[in-house]
Image (cartoon, helix red, strand yellow):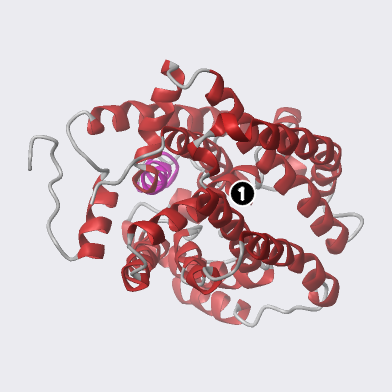
Amino acid sequence: MQKKRYVVLDALRGFAILGICLANFPEFSLWTFSDPAGWTVTDKVTRAIQTFFVDGKFYTLFSLLFGMGFSIQLENAGQKTRTFYRRMIILFLIGLCHLFFLWSGDILMLYAAMGMLLPLFKRLSTKGILISAGIFLTLPVVCEAIFGTTLSDPLEAEQWRICALYGITEANFGTWLADITSYKGMLQFLHQGAVERMWEFVSSYRFFKVLGLFLIGFAIGREKLFADLGAHRKLLKNILLYGLLLGIPVSFLYTWSSMAGEPLGSVAHSVFYLLSVYPMGFAYAAGFCMLFDRSPEGKGWLLLTKPGKVACTNYLMQSVLGVVIFYGIGFGLGGKVGLLGTEAIAAGVYALEIAASALWLSYFRFGPVEWVWRMLTYGQHLPLRKTDK
């Protein structure tokens, strides 16, 4: 079952896990629920920096890598699409458990659902795949122009019905997770959060965005651009250059729009997102690959490969640690830490994941979640310890 691994993809995945942690921890710390009127100057500056450099960029990178991974999996399955679908169904179930039992911000369910559509594009040329990707990435702007200000939430009433059932109100909504001291209370909040998350995928047109990024990653995986970075250095340089030339100035607009509450409207904000987040994300990937190609044996890359090889486990462990650190069933720091402190904690969590991943991989072949995922996919026991055969 072991196939050739590409070090650059593992390192890039490890880098993306850092960004995902920085992006998600403000929600775990409940800072996202805080009143902007109460933000300190440090909060505002940190938020602006986070929006400019992190918001959406690492989600873009993570999605590209999933698309590349799906491409490799389809190839490794020997054209057995059935095996690929089984893999996606299991990922969907992992995401479903994550959503209802740990954190309502799960993305794995959507990744699995959109991944199931990729085999439909296998017969297209690479150019056709990229054109399709461009269409899907642009569709949210079109939809926002048509539905953005009128699209009502059909699940809002159900969400608040669930909240009323458990005693969650607008007054205690933002502090509920920090105040509760039982896992049952946390599950009650996750129940309504899962309903909200389902609508969020629709209202933000996230499924179009994910599918578009998957297709770009799928095209990259098909062409094996990562297998010989030196041969594609000119392409990487152009992606980096033009990504930054477009992404940096529009990122200022996107950051301003986000911080000011979308003063030019949701359509303009969606355009800013399209023209800043994706170019910057692509530039991050290209720049990273160019640096890697200069010194592929560097020790820094080896460190990044550790969390990258067990990315799914680390993604889920970030949720576990977020709960332990910030929720009332753990240390209860939610709502007590500013945004800068939150991001410092996120960086510490990532450092812990590097150390834990390195230790784990010195004894085992796969991460625990990856191991179970593989066994359920192939329907057979796989050796976990490196000493097992």
Q: Which residue is pictured at 25% across the width and 27% down the height?
A: 359
Residue 117 located left or right of residue 39: left
Q: Nearer the viewer, residue 193 or 76?
A: 76
x, y percent for residue 59: 58, 48
Q: Nearer the viewer, residue 354 or 203?
A: 354
User: To which residue does mark 1 refer?
Assistant: 60
Region of the chain picked out in magenta, as a range: 315-329
Where on the picture, by quarter, is residue 108? bottom left
Q: Height in image: 246 above or below 86?
A: above
Examine the structure image and report whether residue 322 is included in the region drawn in magenta: yes
Q: Height in image: 334 above or below 262?
A: above
| Quarter occupied by the C terminus | top left
x, y percent for residue 83: 31, 68
Residue 122 located left or right of residue 339: left
Q: Height in image: 244 above or below 140?
A: above
SS assignment at label 1:
helix
Q: Is residue 279 visible?
A: yes
Residue type marked 1: Thr
Q: Is residue 175 visible?
A: no
x, y percent for residue 49: 72, 32
Where on the picture, by quarter, is residue 125? bottom right
Q: Which residue is pictured at 77% across the width and 54% down the height?
A: 274
Q: Principal SS element in the magenta part? A: helix
x, y percent for residue 254: 81, 46
Residue 93 located left or right of residue 388: right
Examine the structure image and report whether residue 241 is included in the region drawn in magenta: no
Q: In the displayed image of the protein, which residue is found farthest to the front?
A: 231
Q: Height in image: 177 above or below 235?
A: below
Q: Which residue is pictured at 38% across the width and 41% down the height?
A: 321
